[in-house]
Structure formats: C-alpha cells, structure tokens
C-alpha cells in the first residue's frame, strides 16, 4: 500500500497568530449561536443567523459552496452525525444539534463544531455530549512535539469505548491553514492504515471526534450529504482547531480566554 507523499504545511508563529485571529471570530460566532438554539427554531433559521454573523465580521463562510454544499453551517440533529443540510426541520425539546462551522479571515481557515442541547436532554443524550467533549479534550491533551498523530485517536477511542460508545472511522480530522483540509489526516481511533507523522511545532490540525451511542457504522442519506448512524442511534461531534507548539497544544478556537475549552 502506498500512502502517497504527505504535504504537511507547518505554520510560523506569526501565521499561527493569524489563524488565532480567524479562530477567535469563529469562537464568537459559536457563543452567539448557542444563545439562539431553542425548540421551534428551524435549522435553516439557525444557519441564516450564523451566516450573517460571519459576514458581519468581514469573514467568508468556507463551507458554502464547498463541493456544492449549500449552507454556511452543517447542522446535524440526533442520529445525524455530520454534514446535515439546514432546512425546514424544527428543533424539538430533547434534541441534540451538532453545529459545524468554518470561516476564512485574511486567507486563514478556522473550523470548529459543537453539539448543543435543545431544552432538556435525556440522561443518555447528556452523557453522550459529556463523553464526546471529554474525547476531544483528551485528544488535545495527547498533543506533544515528537509524538505520533496516532496518540490523538488512541486517546479518543480509549475514552469512548470505556463509556460504551463507538467512534466513527469513516470521517477524520485534518490539517488546516490556507486550505480547509490539509495533510495530515487525523483519525479519531487507533488507525493502522493511514500515514502517522510525528507532530512538529507549527502543525495546525482540526481534531473532531464523532461519537455514536450505538454502532460506529454510518450511512449517507438520500440528499448525498447528511451522514447518519446506521442504527439511527444518537451521535455527537465536537471539533477544535489546535496548533502544536513547543509548550503543548494551543486551542485556537477556544470559546473565550481563560475558561474551559468549551
Ligand atoms: Mg468542522
Ligand atoms: Mg473539520
């Protein structure tokens, strides 16, 4: 098997600062979006609000038009894993809604996602959100110069399995910078079939575990975009854009300085 040549574009400290500026706008969009999510809101209304926030900040919504995707945000409800197309579906009390947003500021991409609660959740849905957030945090904590990328997926998979959940394998995280998707791929599980480069200072990656309450298997819906769990169990998704520094991980899409990553 040939893995092909890796084309990892390491960023200078100055470039990481520029990505931080882009990612800070995205973090603020998320904080606003959280305040909008409520029963009765349609996913199209949520998307329109998100697009306006991005444009008002002078940035470009990077998902719109990407391979023909029609919206600024991917909005995925309950058994939908990722890539949900916003539309007339109304959010209902007890839903979980995954919101994935990308934007470009001054040529630099930012990419982040979080799964939000609509009203009051079941205990199982609440636990899925908590564990998926923890998976992302543990993946980030495993970042260090000189370690293999696979340390991230190993940490994520170990935690998800301990909780009795499964990790989606067919979609993975990625390098990010001038392009939304750069090398390397960043699997969320212990993977033996992808390149496993060593993390170096200046590597910037989007880590994005997708954790299912049931089977890890997913299918694509008839709209050719929405990825759904094969057994229709709940799925959650959290994502941060993170820079590798000599001092460890720097979470560029952190929601506010000095507080928890989310
Ligand atoms: Mg994303
Ligand atoms: Mg991503």
Image (cartoon, grey):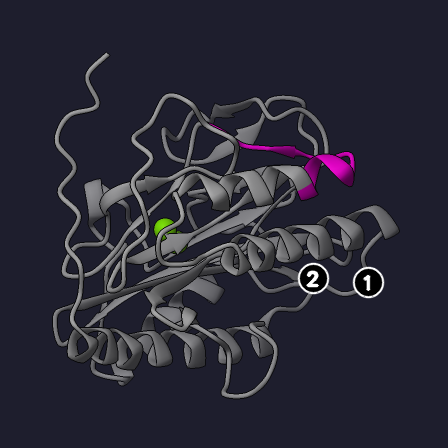
- Nearest the eye: 48 or 25: 25
Q: Secondary structure at mark 1?
A: loop
Is 218 one of the magenta-colored residues?
no
The magenta span reads 159-169
Q: Residue at x 37, y 55 (%)?
A: 206
Q: Quadrant of ligand 1?
A: bottom left
Other-residue count near label 1 (Cα within 10 Å), few / some / many at <14 / 14–19 / ≥20: few
Quarter of the rendering occupied by the N terminus: top left
Q: Is residue 234 left or right of residue 36?
A: right
- Nearest the eye: 31 or 177: 177
* Displayed quadrant of residue 104: bottom left
Res. 117 mark? 2
Res. 120 mark? 1
Q: Position of residue 160 (x, y in %)?
A: 68, 40
**Number of numbered discs overlaid on the protein picture:** 2
Q: Position of residue 108 (x, y in %)?
A: 18, 68
Residue 66's place in the image compared with 12, above or below, is above
Q: Is residue 119 left or right of residue 62?
A: right
Quarter of the rendering occupied by the C terminus: bottom right
The reply to whether discs 1 and 2 touch (Cβ–Cβ < 8 Å) is yes
What is the residue that sits farthest to the front in this orientation?
146
* Displayed quadrant of residue 258: bottom right
Q: Residue at x 83, y 46 (%)?
A: 124
Within 8 Å: ligand 1 and the Cβ of disc 1? no
Q: Secondary structure at mark 2?
A: strand
Residue 87 is at least partly visible in this image = no
Q: Is residue 204 left or right of residue 191?
A: left
Q: Position of residue 170 (x, y in %)?
A: 44, 27
Q: Position of residue 230 (x, y in %)?
A: 60, 22
Other-residue count near label 2 (Cα within 10 Å), few / some / many at <14 / 14–19 / ≥20: many
């Amino acid at each position: 098997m040939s893995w092909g040549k890796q084309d990892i574009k390491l960023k200078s400290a100055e470039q990481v600062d520029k990505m931080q500026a882009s990612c800070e706008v995205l973090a603020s969009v998320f904080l606003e979006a959280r305040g909008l999510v409520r029963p009765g809101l349609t996913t199209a209304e949520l998307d329109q609000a998100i697009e306006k926030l991005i444009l008002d900040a002078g940035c470009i919504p990077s998902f719109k038009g990407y391979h023909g995707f029609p919206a600024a945000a991917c909005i995925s409800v309950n058994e939908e894993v990722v890539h949900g197309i916003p539309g007339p579906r109304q959010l209902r009390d007890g839903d979980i809604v995954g919101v994935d947003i990308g934007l470009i500021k001054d040529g630099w991409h930012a990419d982040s996602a979080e799964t939000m609660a609509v009203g009051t959740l079941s205990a199982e849905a609440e636990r899925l959100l908590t564990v998926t957030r923890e998976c992302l945090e543990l993946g980030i904590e495993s970042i260090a110069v000189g370690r293999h990328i696979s340390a991230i997926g190993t940490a994520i998979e170990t935690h998800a399995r301990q909780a009795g959940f499964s990790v989606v394998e067919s979609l993975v995280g990625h390098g990010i910078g001038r392009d939304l998707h750069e090398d390397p791929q960043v699997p969320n599980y212990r993977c033996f079939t992808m390149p496993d480069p060593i993390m170096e200072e200046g590597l910037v990656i989007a880590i994005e575990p997708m954790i299912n309450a049931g089977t890890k298997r997913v299918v694509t819906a008839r709209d050719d975009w929405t990825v759904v769990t094969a057994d229709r169990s709940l799925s959650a998704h959290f994502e941060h854009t993170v820079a590798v520094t000599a001092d460890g991980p720097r979470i560029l899409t952190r929601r506010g300085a000095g507080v928890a990553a989310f």
